Amino acid sequence: MAHGVDAMATSPEAVMSRLSQLHYLADESLATAIFLAIRLGKPLLLEGAPGVGKTEAAKAVAEALGRDLVRLQCYEGIDAAHALYEWNYQRQLLAIRQAGEAEIDIYGDRFLIARPLLQVLQSPEQRVLLVDEIDRSDHEFEALLLEFLSDFQISIPERGTICAAARPLVVLTSNRTRELAEALRRRCVYHWIGYPDADREAAIIMARAGDVARETALAVAGAVRDIRARPLAKPPGIAEAIEWANAATILEKGGSPWPEAFRRAIGVLIKDEEDVHHIEPEMGRIIEAAMS
């Protein structure tokens, strides 16, 4: 077992502490899910609304373990070639021409382009695989991924089967735009990440923002909580809350007084025209209530 795992995953509390050192504040339930995924050698499935910190959790775990993060961003139409491997046909053709009458192995390593799943299989103890937004892929790709997660191996017809020397750590995220297959869920340690309460979000803002006062972080967290309760097309995530706190602080230091700085920085928080029109009439009252 890698040194990073031994140092980090001794208990859920140790996971929480190590992630906190990296400015990712995991609560007890998330830290426990991460701990169990590492110790049981099972994929970790994180579901939640956009912007609650699922991808950041994977980044923090990889950093805490001292491993590289290999990200597979899913989208509609993603296929095996983008996830597993491809052959470099141009290089193969060039090699064939240069070889002339001589024999050449056109399926050697130099012609193989490893995509994220193969990259992780080749170095499972040096990498963490992030399968981001798996719910955006189609069912066919989900079936392919299910096979990968079952045996952690890839079959290449020209090369044979490549198996991982150890079980790699895999983190899957989903915004729950569609239901995932039960077979996929059964193979994972599951955790739902919700929006944090105002106190916790203020702590996150202070941990991750550059130079934000506690009073500002509390005001932002309170206002964002109020805003999220409204029927918006795109409710602000934690990242937007951090950016809003930073932007308002910059404006305030440049001479724009509170609460005007909050109002002027609204463009980094609300990023949908209809949402802006919906919130603007209420913005003064929301900010005033959050600062009181």
Image (cartoon, helix red, strand yellow):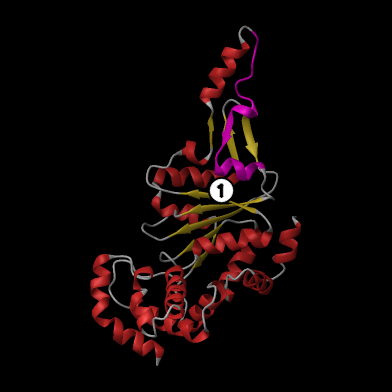
Seen at 56% across and 48% down, the residue is 149
Is residue 39 visible in the rendered structure shown here? no
Percent position of residue 80, x then y: 48, 38
- Amino acid type at circle 1 is Leu
Percent position of residue 11, x then y: 69, 71
Q: Is residue 121 magenta?
A: yes
Percent position of residue 141, x then y: 44, 44
Is residue 126 visible in the rendered structure shown here? yes
User: Is 135 situated above or below 144?
Assistant: below
Seen at 59% across and 18% down, the residue is 95
How crowded pointer 1 is (Cα within 10 Å; few <14, some 14-19, many 20+) is rated as some
Seen at 42% across and 69% down, the residue is 240
Is residue 57 shown left or right of residue 125? left
Q: In the rendered image, which quarter is residue 254 located in?
A: bottom left
Q: How many marks?
A: 1
Specify start and end residues of the magenta stretch as a single range.
Answer: 102-122
Mark 1 element type: helix
Q: Which residue is mark 1?
A: 149
Seen at 62% across and 33% down, the residue is 161
Q: Is residue 79 magenta?
A: no
From the viewer's side, name the closer residue of 98 and 182.
98
Q: The C terminus is located in which quarter?
A: bottom left
